Image: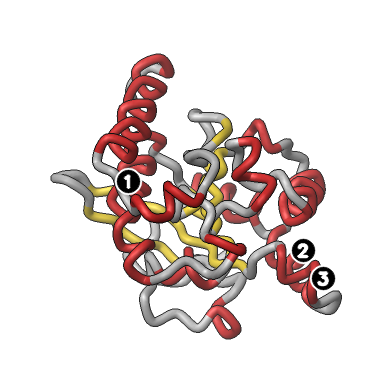
Amino acid sequence: MDSLENRTDRLEAIKRSIIDNEVCSELAKSATRLVFGDGDLDSQIVFIGEAPGRNEDLTGLPFVGAAGKFLEEMLGKIGLRRNQVYITNIVKYRPPHNRDPLPQEKKAFLPYLQQQLEVIQPRLVVTLGRHSASCFLPDIRISAEHGKPKRLTLAFSGERLSIVLLPLFHPAAALYNGSMRQTLIDDFIQIPDIIRALNRDKLAANQQLTL
């Protein structure tokens, strides 16, 4: 793996290329700033949300609003802090009025998300919400597949990255629906077992992970 300095430089180059290529220029015009990602580049775990909200747009950091506080609470339940994982979104600019990201916006940003993953080389990718999960599993029904880890092989620009994908509901779901809170926690606390299983087992592509 590249040195931390080199990976930091590569991520900065990806960030600059989003701006230079004017990706989703209309979104960029309505947003305050690009929200690229934040966290530990040595982490085995990357969390991927959908798009920045108001607080993220103001600070330039992902998941710093109410949903982010719940994410940090869940991280605490498994003995982690947010600076020990890497957190990003598919779409890097806030959609107006916090609307859902559009298919064409997700498609435009997906190559840059793939480049981020290529640099960080995580073993576990945790998708937060149906929009991020569908970027990896287009036909996923999050209501049926949440909390079920899958082994995937991602093909990038000439490189292949083997990961386990853990699709979860978005933490914001618990803010609007109290009954979702325990579901999210129950799914989330599998993460240490998944990491241990990854260190123990070699899994066939696209098969459910056995804990």
- Considering only vertical position in the picture, is 7 above or below 180? above
Is residue 179 or residue 95 the one in the foreground?
95
Instruction: Give, as a three-letter code, the residue at label 1.
Output: Tyr
> What crowding class fits label 2: few (fewer than 14 Cα within 10 Å), some (14-19), or many (20 or more)?
many
Outermost left residue? 158
Quarter of the image where one finds residue 144: bottom right
Question: Would you place residue 40 above or below residue 168 in this image?
Answer: above
- Quarter of the figure with the N terminus: top left
Q: Secondary structure at mark 3?
A: helix
Location of residue 2 in the rendering, given as x and y in whole percent from the top left corner: 33, 22
Q: According to the image, label 1 marks what residue?
A: 112
Relative to residue 102, is residue 141 drawn left or right? Answer: right
The dot on residue 185 is 2
Q: Is residue 77 visible?
A: yes
Q: Quote the CA–CA distance across marks 2 and 3.
A: 5 Å
Percent coordinates x, y for residue 47 in the rendering: 55, 50
Q: Nearer the viewer, mark 1 or mark 3?
A: 1
User: Alpha-carbon distance for marks 1 and 3?
Assistant: 33 Å
Residue found farthest to the right:
178
Between 181 and 147, the one nearer to me in the picture: 181
| Secondary element at tag 2 | helix
Q: Which residue is pictured at 39% across the width and 39% down the height?
A: 121
Q: Is residue 63 above or below residue 148?
A: above
